[in-house]
Amino acid sequence: MSKEENLQLPLDFFPKSLPNLKDFIVGDNVEAFAEICALADGRGSQFVYLFGPHGTGKSFLAEALNAGRSSEAVPDYQEGRKLYVVDDVHTLNAEQKQKLFDLFTEVRAHPGTSLLTTGLKSPQALKSEGLREDISSRLSWGSVFELVPLQEKQKRQAFIDHANERGLIVSEETMNWILTYLPRDMSTLSRLFDGVERYSRSKKRPLTIPLIKEWLEQEKMRDRNE
């Protein structure tokens, strides 16, 4: 296995920064992002469901909107609380699904409260795969948005812009290498950039392929030792 192939291993040791709506790369998801921003401002639909494949930003938006409100997969209804978030409904167990059903009921009964849910597929598709019909139907209440992945040129430009905002330059060669040998979802690329940026500044060296490889090897060693 070559060094480049070895770097294609899962890079879940990347430092993970707290999601922030201002860091979301919108791409073609303009309407969905506008709705999420409305929810963050206390406006928007009472019910919003986001779906799409891994790497489209569903969990990023859910975490940014949740902002420490609850660590539970499905929070309990609380008098006075205005916003609830349930991520990855397709992964919930039977008990959690019942809690979600109850939460839908409570939120609907209290105007001024909102619930954001996310999943891999459309409500109808989840129903076809065995999700409770009474839950899949509720996922269709309010606004439903399908998030689409960033196009290749959008990813490339977003990464370059992210670097330039920090005063770093990413050459075309370096960008091509990143998109060829490293995970391509924006969440991982953003976490990679945050780590590499700090390393580049600490070493006072430009952002190059050798520097990225050096940082990756260092992070892998640190991960093994923890």
Image (tube, rainbow, N blue to C red):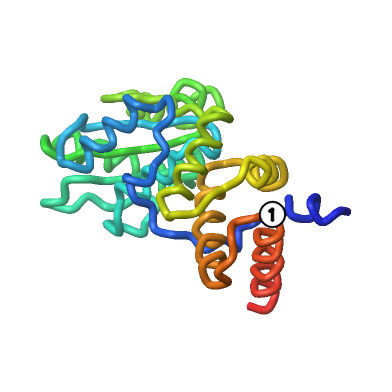
Q: Quadrant of residue 35?
A: top left
Residue 221 position within the rendered picture, expressed as x and y whole percent measured from the top left: 70, 73
- Closer to us: 1 or 130: 1
Q: Which residue is farthest bottom? A: 225
Residue 42 position within the rendered picture, expressed as x and y whole percent measured from the top left: 15, 41
Query: Where does the C terminus fall, quadrant-wise?
Result: bottom right
Q: Residue at x 56, y 50 (%)?
A: 188
- Closer to us: 174 or 226: 174
Q: Looking at the image, is 58 positioned above or below residue 136?
A: below
Q: Along the horizontal axis of the image, is 54 left or right of 61? A: right
Q: Quadrant of residue 43?
A: top left
* Number of numbered discs on residues: 1
Query: Where does the N terminus fall, quadrant-wise?
Result: bottom right
Which class describes the residues within 10 Å of circle 1: few (<14), some (14-19), or many (20+)? some
Q: Along the horizontal axis of the image, is 61 left or right of 217? A: left
- Closer to us: 177 or 203: 203
Q: Along the horizontal axis of the image, is 37 left or right of 5? A: left
Q: Residue at x 48, y 31 (%)?
A: 131
Q: Residue at x 71, y 59 (%)?
A: 210
Q: Along the horizontal axis of the image, is 85 left or right of 211? A: left
Q: From the image, tell me which residue sits under label 1.
A: 209
Q: Looking at the image, is 185 positioned above or below residue 205?
A: above
Residue 156 position within the rendered picture, expressed as x and y whole percent measured from the top left: 55, 36
Asked whether residue 130 appears in the rendered view, the answer is no
Q: Secondary structure at mark 1?
A: helix
Q: Looking at the image, is 96 positioned above or below residue 155?
A: below
Q: Residue at x 28, y 41 (%)?
A: 102
- Closer to us: 218 or 202: 202
Q: Which amino acid, by three-letter code, is at mark 1?
A: Ile
Q: Looking at the image, is 121 positioned above or below residue 223?
A: above
